[in-house]
Amino acid sequence: MFVLLFSIQHKAQINKTNPNKNNSKKNPETFSISKTDFDKLFTFKSNQVITLSQNIYLDKSVSLLNTKNGDMIFLKIKLNYFKKAYLLVQINGSYSTQIFILSDDKSIFYKGKLSSTGLLMTKCLEEEIVSE
């Protein structure tokens, strides 16, 4: 009986995963998306894989929703770099553009600021996105 318990305990210890191994890729404080790449995001259809090899944050992501109603546009992309996160873009004509990244497990939050040269994504707290 002792041998059986010892072997089960030993096997359980061997099969444990290293928690630091899953976190080997640290999320950046900021990252940018060029104006050209940002504009290309609106050309992908729903469920289409995005191929932008020059941008590791967007490459191999999947466009889930790309809809336009009048001057309103909504874009939702499942990001490949951030495994449980989505890039969301909401454009309300010329009045406002909201860009942010949210994760399913509430571990990743970024807000975007659009300029004439592109998009700067900055890590933030959930409250900073909700309050906008």
Image (cartoon, grey):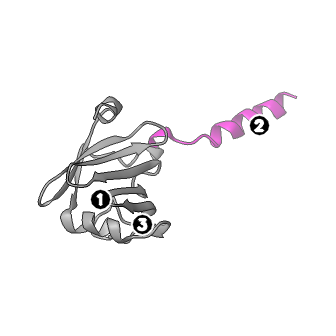
Q: CA distance from mark 2 to mark 1?
A: 65 Å
Q: Which mark is residue 60?
A: 3
Name the residue nearer the viewer: 91 or 106.
Answer: 91
State yes or no: discs 2 and 1 in contact (Cβ < 8 Å).
Answer: no
Q: Residue at x 42, y 37 (%)?
A: 107
Q: CA distance from mark 2 to mark 3?
A: 43 Å
Residue that extends furthest to the right in the rendered view of this protein:
1
Q: Is residue 118 magenta?
A: no
Where disc 2 sits, the SS reads helix
In this view, the mark in front (2 or 1): 1
> In the rendering, at what x and y percent does residue 126 appear?
35, 33
Q: Is residue 7 magenta?
A: yes
Name the residue nearer the viewer: 90 or 34.
Answer: 90
Where disc 1 sits, the SS reads loop
State yes or no: discs 2 and 3 in contact (Cβ < 8 Å).
Answer: no
Name the residue nearer the viewer: 130 or 14.
Answer: 130
> In the rendering, at what x and y percent does residue 62 appear?
45, 63
Q: Which mark is residue 71?
A: 1
Does label 2 or label 3 sit earlier along the sequence? 2
User: Quadrant where the C terminus lies?
Assistant: top left
Identify the magenta region. Answer: 1-20
Q: Which mark is residue 7?
A: 2
Q: Which secondary structure dominates the residues rendered in magenta?
A: helix
